[in-house]
Image: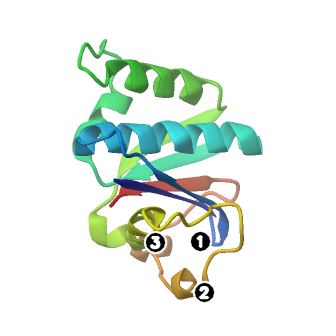
C-alpha cells in the first residue's frame, strides 16, 4: 500500500510532499494512521506551529480527535500521533472527502512506484487542485492532506 502526504499553505501552494510504501500495512486503517503519523512528523520537522491535518478516513480522523484511550491494534500509532500533535501550537484534524484530496491520493498511488518525496513535485501532479481552497483559511495555517493507495 502507498501513502501520500501533501503540505500546503493557506493559499494552496504546495510546501512539501512525501510518499511512502507501507508493505506491512494490509489494513487501510493502519495505513491511514501511519500517514497521519508521518504528516505530524513532517510538520514538526518543518517547524510549523499552525497545522490542519486533513484526511478522508473518518475512522482515523475521529480517533485522532478523541481523548479516549485507543486499545485497538493501531492504538499505539494513534496515541503517538496525538502526542506529536500536542507539540504543535495550533493543530486541528479535519475530515475531507476523497474528491477533495486528489493530490494526496495520486501521490499515494505513485508511492508504489518508489516516487521520492524529497524532489520537486512531478509535473503530472502540479495541476491537481483541491476544491476546499475556496474556503477562508488563516494566513499562517499549513494543511497536511494524507491518503493511501
Label 1 secondary element: loop
Q: Residues within 10 Å of mark 2 (few under 14, many from 20)?
A: few
- Give whichever of discs 2 and 1 has the lower sequence position: 1
The answer to whether marks 3 and 1 mark residues whose Cβ atoms lie closer than 8 Å is no
Indicate the position of residue 52 as horizontal and vertical percent values: 52, 48
Looking at the image, what colour scheme do you see? rainbow
Badge nearest the viewer, 3 or 1: 3
- Separation of residues labelled 2 and 3 (CA atoms): 12 Å
Label 3 secondary element: helix
- Give whichever of discs 3 and 1 has the lower sequence position: 1
Position of the C terminus, as image quadrant, is: bottom left
- Separation of residues labelled 3 and 1 (CA atoms): 11 Å
- Separation of residues labelled 2 and 1 (CA atoms): 16 Å
Q: Residue at x 47, y 62 (%)?
A: 111
Q: Residue at x 26, y 40 (%)?
A: 29
Which of the 4 image quarters holds residue 59? top left
Please give the label number shown on residue 12.
Answer: 1
Q: Is residue 116 left or right of residue 100?
A: right
Q: Which residue carries the number 3 mark?
A: 103
Vertical placement of 105 versus 76: above or below?
Answer: below
Q: Residues within 10 Å of mark 1 (few under 14, many from 20)?
A: some
Q: Which residue carries the number 2 mark?
A: 123
Indicate the position of residue 56 as horizontal and vertical percent values: 30, 55
Q: Residue at x 37, y 46 (%)?
A: 23
Indicate the position of residue 144 as horizontal and vertical percent values: 53, 53
Amino acid at each position: 500500500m502507498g501513502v501520500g502526504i501533501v503540505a500546503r499553505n493557506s493559499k494552496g501552494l504546495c510546501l512539501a510532499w512525501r510518499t511512502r510504501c507501507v508493505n506491512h500495512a494490509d489494513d487501510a486503517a493502519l495505513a491511514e494512521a501511519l500517514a497521519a503519523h508521518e504528516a505530524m512528523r513532517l510538520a514538526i520537522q518543518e517547524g510549523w506551529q499552525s497545522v490542519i491535518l486533513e484526511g478522508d478516513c473518518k475512522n482515523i480522523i475521529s480517533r485522532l480527535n478523541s481523548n479516549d484511550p485507543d486499545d485497538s491494534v493501531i492504538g499505539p500509532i494513534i496515541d503517538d500521533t496525538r502526542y506529536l500533535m500536542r507539540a504543535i501550537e495550533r493543530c486541528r484534524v479535519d475530515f475531507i472527502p476523497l474528491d477533495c484530496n486528489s493530490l494526496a491520493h495520486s501521490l499515494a498511488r505513485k508511492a508504489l512506484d518508489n516516487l521520492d518525496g524529497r524532489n520537486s513535485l512531478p509535473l503530472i501532479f502540479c495541476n491537481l487542485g483541491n476544491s476546499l481552497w475556496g474556503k477562508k483559511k488563516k494566513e499562517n495555517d499549513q494543511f497536511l492532506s494524507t491518503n493511501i493507495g
